[in-house]
Amino acid sequence: MTTRTEATASERGGSLRQQHVAEALAGYAFVAIPMVLFLIFNVGAILFAFVISVFDWGIRAGPREFLGFGNFEDALANPVFWKSVGNTVRYTVIVVPCQMALGLFLAVIVNQKIRGQTFFRAAFYFPAIASSAAITVLFIYIMQPEGLFNSFRNVLGPLDPFGALGIAENHPWLGHSTTALESVMALNIWTTSGTMMLFYLASLQTIPRETYEAAEMDGANAWDAFWRITFPLLRPGHFFVATISVIGSLQIFDQAFVAGGLSGEPNNALSTMVLFIARQVRENVDMGFAAAVGVLLFFLIMAVTLVQRRLFGAAPTWY
Amino acid sequence: MRQKLLVSSFGMLLLLAACAPGPGASAPDSEESGAPQGSGGAAAECLGEGTVIFSGWEAGPAEGDLLEQMIADFEERCPNITVDYQPAADYDAAMIANFSAATVPDTFYVNSTRAPEWIDEGFLLPLDDYLSQAGVDVSTFYPNYLDAFKGPDGQIYGLPKDASTLVLFYNPDMLEAAGVEPPTNWEELQSAAEALTSDDVTGLCLQTGLDRALAFVYQAGGSIYNEDFTEVTFDSPETREALDYYLSFFENDTGQTPVELGSDWCGQAFGEEKVAMTFEGNWLIPTLEDTYPDVPFEMAEMPQGKEQATLAFTVSYSIGADSENPDAGWSLLSYLTGPEGMETWTSLGLALPARSDVAVPEGRDALIAGNDYARPWRFTSGFGDVESAFNNAMTAAVEGTGGTDEIVQATSEAAQGTVE
């Protein structure tokens, strides 16, 4: 009897170990496919960009001359590069907090048990599904001198806040260098708020209901509950949303490209770092210089992400 | 990796050259007979065989019809060559990707502004061997246009497919109502713009781009570079005079940008009758005829400054250095840029011929007159930065946050970066 049990146990144990190994192998095999693609087309491409950035690199001829940090020096001495960096940073500093606040606000609202909850979730998410190029084209029409936005301002008449700021009633929002970037900011805050809402919504579900019940027993109102429970417990959510939002903002390209073309019109107001890189390749066919700017952007994003980790603590834990 | 690819494709070329009859090898009999043979056999200009991949940016419907007809005519003439027409959206970006992958169309468009980079980067095949073997007389092309596709080595890297100069477009009804004659010089242009400006209409639509303003710089006797692009000459009293003049239209509100007018470009503003005059090329005519058939328009040569000058825009057909079928690509190229092909292409007036032996569509006198004194819109590698620096500084000046000094400084600085 004992021997039999032992035999079965060891037998079972062996098969379990085998099963484990087989399972692990299958797991690695499945992971291997995307991993190899990731290593070649992401990590490999990034490393290759580092190589290109120290050469005078012809797109057809390959490396022509080793320049060391020459391309980087050229970039740092280029006024349009700095203008592009300035635009990108300004864009990020304004867009990220607005996106996060709006995303959180929408998430808290649609997280309530209200009638038509599903409809509102879908409606708020909708702009994120539409193609950014299509939305930008629409936006260009709205913001034209005789577009919908200015017509709306005319209806408001003396109540129009922009008129009070001295902005003409037929102001070309995207065509004037003082408002072009701000207009694209507004566009992007609107279109991406739905995505941010979705992330926050997922994060909101992780907060245990008992916490709220306990707070209610202690006499906390909804306002207190939000600021003392929801907001601090959303910390992993904040980190995730902030990281996604910052990276997306630093890489702003498509809306600026559709609205201002490759040269970042008007007056470089829509010149962003990625647009600057694209221009170096498409117009000047200068791969080394473009790669150098890409490397600088890489370090900028990495630095900002590290600072964020400091601010929000370690990597988020989802439970 | 790319090196290897290059070496192997070069090897392939050599092999091809060794196996296939070289350029002109099949020519002798027909050369003796003089005239090209009919559809019965391959004519003298049918070098190579197989498929030619032919690419360009997307054509409008009418242009597409003409292209199809030209391709059909060519295939009838050269029955052993088939044309695979593959137009590309976002053409420059698509072509850069093609060049880097070394899989390029055989025959394709090259915009004259892109020519310097594309030649320097070795994207294009020099055509001199083909030209001399086929005995093409390049002097029938207007030199302004042909020169745009000459490399620093003096070789020709493309033959112009069509061309247009800039002229003054004006609305004759508006001019008549204001009692003004079409302006012929700077003073007349200024007074005409003033007389034509009213509450509803602005006298002149002016773009902030260097591709318009440079005509005025040339008219004043200024320039961006010296002749061989080794020195920047932009900062001169002549340039400043031209820029002051150009900006004066914005200052006294007799000229507006398309942005201010709420149009995509000046051609549209002219069609919408928001302005009485603007500077455009032949490309505006089909737009006006199709989209704004009721808007009257006439053309005059560019008003004169100290000199008579205008800009010329052209596009070539070229062959890729990595083309797999350059011989057949050449056959197509030489047909398209030849008198027959170009006659078909320009027959509807959608484009103007780049060679002097092709008849010009009616009513294009002003555009053609410019061929004698136009300067090609073609500079040196890296010119995109110069154009962009100028355009941005000009936009700032129009918005009132800069002026001639800033434009001259920004443009000269950017241009300096292209001559070093």
Image (tube, coloured by chain):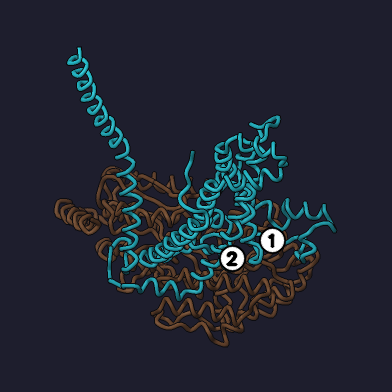
Chain colours: A cyan, B brown
Amino acid carrying mark 2 in the image: Ala
Quadrant into which the C terminus of chain B falls:
bottom left
Would you call the spot at circle 1 few (<14 residues within 10 Å), some (14-19), or many (20 or more)? many
Q: Is residue B266 above or below residue B79?
A: below
Question: Percent from the top left, x then y, of residue B269?
Answer: 67, 59
Quadrant into which the N terminus of chain B falls:
bottom left
Q: Is residue A23 left or right of residue B186?
A: left
The residue tagged with tag 1: helix, strand or loop? loop
Amino acid carrying mark 1 in the image: Pro
Residue nearest the observer in this picture, B333 or B362: B333
Q: Is residue B317 above or below residue B246?
A: above
Residue under pointer 2: A269
Question: Percent from the top left, x then y, of residue A299?
Answer: 42, 63
User: Foreground mark, 1 or 2?
Assistant: 2
Residue occupying image coordinates x 63% and y 79%: B403
Residue occupying image coordinates x 41% and y 48%: B70
Q: Is residue B306 left or right of residue A222?
A: left
Q: Is residue B392 left or right of residue A117?
A: left
Residue nearest the observer in this picture, B69 or A294: A294
Q: CA distance from mark 1 to mark 2?
A: 13 Å
Residue occupying image coordinates x 71% and y 42%: A220
Residue under pointer 1: A172
